[in-house]
Image: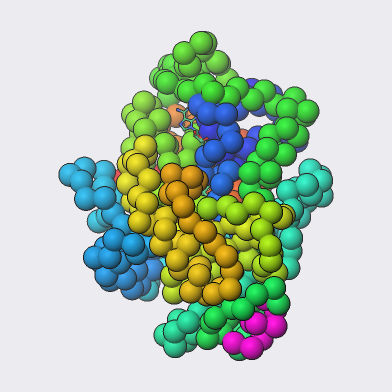
Amino acid sequence: MKIVIAGGGVIGLSCAYYLQKEGHEVILIDNTAMTDGASYGNAGHIVPSHFVPLASPGIIAQGMRWMLNSSSPFYIKPRLDMDLLRWGFAFWRHSNEKTMQQNIPHLHRLLTLSRELFEEMKNELGNNFFMKEKGILIVYKTKESEKHEQALAKLAEQMGMRSDILSEQQVQELESATTINVRGGVLYKDDAHLHPGLFTTTLSHYLVTKGVKIISNTAISGFEKSGNKISAVVTAHEKITADEFILANGAWLPELSKKLGIKILMQAGKGYSITYENYQPQLQYPAILVDHRVVTTPIGNDLRLAGTMEINTPGSPVMPKRVKAIVESVRKYYPDLDLPFTDATKAWSGLRPLSPDGLPYIGRHSTYVNLIIAGGHAMLGLSLATGTGKLVQQMIDQHQLSMAVDAFNCERFK
Ligand SMILES: Cc1cc2nc3c(=O)[nH]c(=O)nc-3n(C[C@H](O)[C@H](O)[C@H](O)COP(=O)(O)OP(=O)(O)OC[C@H]3O[C@@H](n4cnc5c(N)ncnc54)[C@H](O)[C@@H]3O)c2cc1C
């Protein structure tokens, strides 16, 4: 089959990877050079341990408290926008214990599938993107976080994940490079990390050698349809016909799907990363500093800090106070690290595609017989990419699916 994929982030690339393996003719189109999207500059954590979806009890109250602080890790740009209101209402409705418990098994299965598939992909591509499988540390400073994280670690063990609950001293022994100022932590041993930019560029180069046509710096501006079938995508230069179409264009999915008359409930959650090149002393472990919602990743010779969730429109300006707050938070955990902060505009920013219940959208849309949606992976796009790509390929080839996908139905908020 001839298949067009809209979007060259980690989700579109993973779909292309599994589809070319089955012998399909794949054309992937991205409106950028594919070196700066959410998939490129993120924290690089592959986290099967993150089985609790974003919409969970307590998140709304926490978010409200954070909204009052201009350097907190969370912000919603107030605006009169029906899509934001609908999204906010749906998010509120899903942030409860019952829905969270219903959604955990689905997210867990997709995370586990993706983690297994990553192994295969790493071996096939050659690991020149610094993938390391030594685990990721969750560290906390408060008693409440300790209680919460230890309960999660026990649940993770019951679900088959390997984790160690660590005292302050045990965390320090693991992080031997520098002082770490925490109450304790959990090491999730099945988690991994990599350089996301090198990963996506390696994957796209590999795909080109396998015959995938990648058209970059070209926006899809519309579609040609006949009845319940899409016949072509339209760009400024040409019309490209195909048998199947996959929308995997991240936080811009609602904008593009509107051109097909389809409403996808999604908001963009902007985050930042700051990378210190050739950093010494290099951290031994990537870490999630839970009380400040900031993460650190040693990527090759570099050190990356990332964080902040700003619900804002694509194209909104950088908020310097929030970028600075990321660096200041990290200093509280690693007091001896030299982390100069001069210019917020040098920070990288990316948009997390947020669905209202914390589960992605993966599947066919009933309006067209040849359309698949693959998006809304929020804070977990890298961690969920391989599983998503594999499922999309299985849908197109009408093969048995590796897991049930009803929970990811892209029409669940109709
Ligand atoms: C600060 C930060 C840290 C993060 N850390 C992690 C992490 O550690 N682990 C993890 O699993 N996830 C992480 N994430 C989340 C992850 O980055 C995203 O979930 C993931 O990158 C989404 O991938 P995507 O392919 O759906 O979207 P994108 O990577 O945004 O790709 C979509 C592409 O489609 C293109 N596009 C848009 N419109 C069009 C159009 N009309 N025509 C053609 N192309 C178009 C865009 O330009 C873009 O290149 C992080 C995100 C942020 C912001």
Residue 307 forms part of the magenta stretch:
no
Q: Depth check: 247 or 252 in front?
A: 252
Q: Is residue 137 above or below residue 296?
A: below
Looking at the picture, how far across and down is residue 361, in whole percent? 47, 47
For image coordinates 69% across by 73% down, the residue present is 177
Q: Is residue 140 above or below residue 377?
A: below
Q: Is residue 5 above or below residue 374?
A: above
Looking at the picture, how far across and down is residue 311, in whole percent? 33, 51
* The magenta segment: 168-175
Q: Is residue 225 left or right of residue 36?
A: left
For image coordinates 71% across by 77% down, the residue present is 176
Which quarter shows the N terminus? top right
* Residue 24 visible (yes or no): yes
Residue 170 forms part of the magenta stretch:
yes
Q: Residue lying furthest left in this view?
A: 80
For image coordinates 70% across by 69% down, the residue present is 284
Looking at the picture, how far across and down is residue 112, in whole percent? 64, 62
Q: Is residue 40 left or right of residue 278?
A: left
* Residue 52 visible (yes or no): no
Q: Is residue 388 left or right of residue 127?
A: left
* Magenta highlight: main SS: helix
Which quarter of the picture shows residue 59? bottom left
Which quarter shows the C terminus? top left
Q: Depth check: 171 or 99 in front?
A: 171
